[in-house]
Image (cartoon, grey):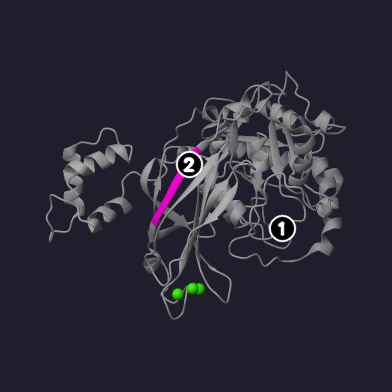
Amino acid sequence: MTADRLQRFLVEVQNEDKATVDEAEAIIANNSSVMFHRKEFNVDGFFRYLLGSSVPVLSPHSIQQDMTAPLSHYFIFTGHNSYLTGNQLSSDCSDVPIIQALEKGVRVIELDIWPNSTEDDVLVLHGIALYMVHRIFGNMLFTPDKECLEEFPSPESLKKRFIISTKPPKEYLKAEKTKDEGNESHEKDSSASAWGGEIPNALDDKDDSDEDVSDDDGDDDLQTGDVAPEYKSLIAIHAGKGKGGLDDWLKVDPDKVRRLSLSENELEKAAKTHGPQIVRFTQRNILRVYPKGIRFDSSNYNPLVGWMHGAQMVAFNMQGYGRSLWLMQGMFRGNGGCGYIKKPDFLLTGGHEVFDPRVELPVTIYMGEGWFYDFKHTHFDAYSPPDFYVRIGIAGVPADSIMKKSKSVEDSWNPAWDEEFEFALTVPELALLRVEVHENDISEADDFAGQTCLPVREINKGIRPVPLYNQEGDKYPSVKLLMLFDTV
Ligand SMILES: [Ca+2]
Ligand SMILES: [Ca+2]
Ligand SMILES: [Ca+2]
């Protein structure tokens, strides 16, 4: 390949409009081995260049979205029981998972500050704890000028600051009692596979037999009667359901904004009967969704149900590795990984869902490499090289959600699949591209060989190296795929 042709390739395929022939010449010189003619690319040099491309599949560390809108206009990376190191029942509390979550971009951390005394002491102890919070954080703590906010502050204005959202102590105590009563008979440790379960399609009808188990961390009424005033003044985002049912919970008050918490089950039910009301509620108010009470193994659920309805805080167990968490991590790889993703316009304006016309997303998977360096050579198959295949698809609104499969390439550390997949998207704004590499085995379950999840609207067009991640969501040092993304 000559410099002229490389320059044309950069403009036409890689979307690098300003690429010059001089730049193309420099690229060839930098990527060709000295033994070969340095004015032209051989195939080897070309692939080396593409796999090490300076333009990654997502633009890192660049916040491209407007960060000055109220908090209710964003999906926010949200943890559930952020202090637990493992399952929901017997694992230890620690600050380590909180630090890890913050480093991975989580921006809503859930803390429970528990009194260990009688109910009478609760307010006092909480008062002290929160007084200390105030003393420690000082001006970094956002405190509202008046009791109820009319509009939430923006992520921009909250930079390097903390904001507290909660319900008063009395409610916590009641919730704890329910928790103790409900748990014993359900103690079990699920032996989830490396993949976690397949993501259930959003809003599928399914067996709701687990609905009677009490979910323990919904926010009850904010009863402010006898709460210490210094405590009250620190709560900027009031949590509360109010009396009555869904119609009351979802009422929009023009003079104040608040936060409502629904369990994943409550949301699924509400979505079937009150879809437009939920979307309207989330245009100004914050909706938090949390894992149902029986997820003792810290597993998660399909986050799309919440996102489709504008829920800002889809709270996840960050230690619950598997496909659902990969979607969550994938969504928040967007917008520079800052932990905030601007909600699509159709969720912010008007009462009706206006979907774009269908767009096509063609994706070609050329090849993969890096396992040879990142794994023991007997890791996949003891007596032969691995047999990799790719599962690729979309997580999005139900109409867009699909998974497809490549052929399996037998006995190769550097598989070349060369397969094109096409996806039709009705709501590209909410679509995540899912990629899983499996190592095929005949007599036992496939081995896990990497995964990633990418927000479709931020994928850079062209041929891109796509780094893969392990189950926990940490990037492998060398494993990557080479993929072509066409017009979205
Ligand atoms: Ca194997
Ligand atoms: Ca093999
Ligand atoms: Ca095998």
Q: Which residue is drawn at the image coordinates 72% and 44% (left, top)?
A: 203
Q: Which residue is drawn at the image coordinates 64% and 53% (left, top)?
A: 199
| Mark linked to residue 147 | none
- Residue 335, visible in the rendered structure: no
Front-most of residues 73 and 16: 16
| Mark linked to residue 361 | 2
Toward which corner of the image does residue 32 lie, by quadrant? bottom left
**Magenta run includes residue 95:** no
Q: Is residue 82 above or below residue 445?
A: above
- The span from disc 1 to disc 2 (Cα, nearest Å) is 39 Å
Q: Amino acid at mark 2?
A: Leu
Task: Tell me the element at label 1.
Answer: loop
**Magenta run includes residue 361:** yes
Q: Is residue 116 above or below residue 341?
A: below
User: Label 2: how many residues lie within 10 Å, few (<14), some (14-19) or many (20+)?
Assistant: some
Q: Residue furthest bottom?
A: 383
Q: Which residue is drawn at the image coordinates 24% and 56% (left, top)?
A: 43
- Residue 336, visible in the rendered structure: yes
Q: Earlier in the sequence, mark 1 or mark 2?
A: 1
Front-most of residues 204 and 360: 360
Q: Which percent across, then down, holds residue 326? A: 56, 52
Q: In the rendered image, which residue does mark 1 sit on?
A: 88
Q: Which percent across, then down, holds residue 321? A: 60, 58
Toward which corner of the image does residue 154 lie, by quadrant? top right
